[in-house]
Amino acid sequence: MSSLRLRHHNNCPRCPVIGVEDIPGEEFFEILSLRFNIAVARKLSASHDLVRVEPLALARWLQHARILESHLWHLPTNAGHGIIVTLPAGCGKPVIDGNHRAARALRLGEPFFAVELSESETLELLRLSMSPAIADHFWKRMLASRPHPDDQ
Ligand SMILES: [Zn+2]
């Protein structure tokens, strides 16, 4: 009897599902109440220059990221750069794409490069990823918040 359960490469939930590697699904990154559409983020960041992410800032961010240790070593070595967004009022610069690539680069002592979206681009991305009204609501709440010392 064949199983209808989807199987992932390497038996790893973060690896592609076997048989549908070439069909990119909707990919989202979620943090707090925010939701970022990765395909839209890639489009918005297409014309940007890459910046080398400072390792200490990266290490601090990755303490909060959900990293599946075993998946680090499933990544292709040419997996490319990450995407960083800029939240308003010093609320931080989350890495929304490439966290596992970043974690691996850090472990190996290799540089990690990313595109950094500006505040206005980040708001645009949020408005395209969630409903614009909800994106505006959370954006205003961040603008009104006091920055946390860890976010500097
Ligand atoms: Zn994996």
Image (cartoon, rainbow, N blue to C red):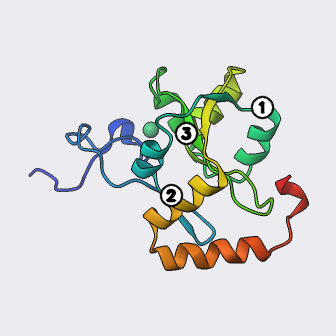
Quick one: SS at disc 3?
Answer: loop
The label nearer to you, 1 versus 2, is 2
Q: Label 3 near label 2: C-beta < 8 Å? A: no
How packed mark 3 is, by other alpha carbons closer than 10 Å (few <14, some 14-19, many 20 or more), is some
Taking the image as shown, residue 88 lies to the left or right of residue 27, namely right
Q: Earlier in the sequence, mark 1 or mark 2?
A: 1
The residue indicated by pointer 1 is: 55
Q: Which mark is residue 1?
A: none
Q: Position of residue 102 (x, y in %)?
A: 63, 34
Quick one: SS at disc 1?
Answer: helix
| Closer to the camera in the image, 66 or 56 | 56
Q: Which residue in the rendered view is the most extreme toward the right?
A: 149
The residue indicated by pointer 2 is: 125
Q: Is residue 130 visible?
A: yes
In the image, what residue type sits under mark 1? Pro
User: Which residue is painted at 46% across and 70% down in the image?
Assistant: 130
Q: Earlier in the sequence, mark 1 or mark 3?
A: 1
Taking the image as shown, residue 24 lies to the left or right of residue 35, namely left
Quick one: SS at disc 2?
Answer: helix
Q: Label 2 CB, ligand 1: below 8 Å? A: no
| Closer to the camera in the image, 14 or 93 | 93
Q: Position of residue 13 (x, y in %)?
A: 41, 48
In the image, what residue type sits under mark 3? Gly
How packed mark 2 is, by other alpha carbons closer than 10 Å (few <14, some 14-19, many 20 or more), is many
In the image, what residue type sits under mark 2? Leu
The residue indicated by pointer 3 is: 98
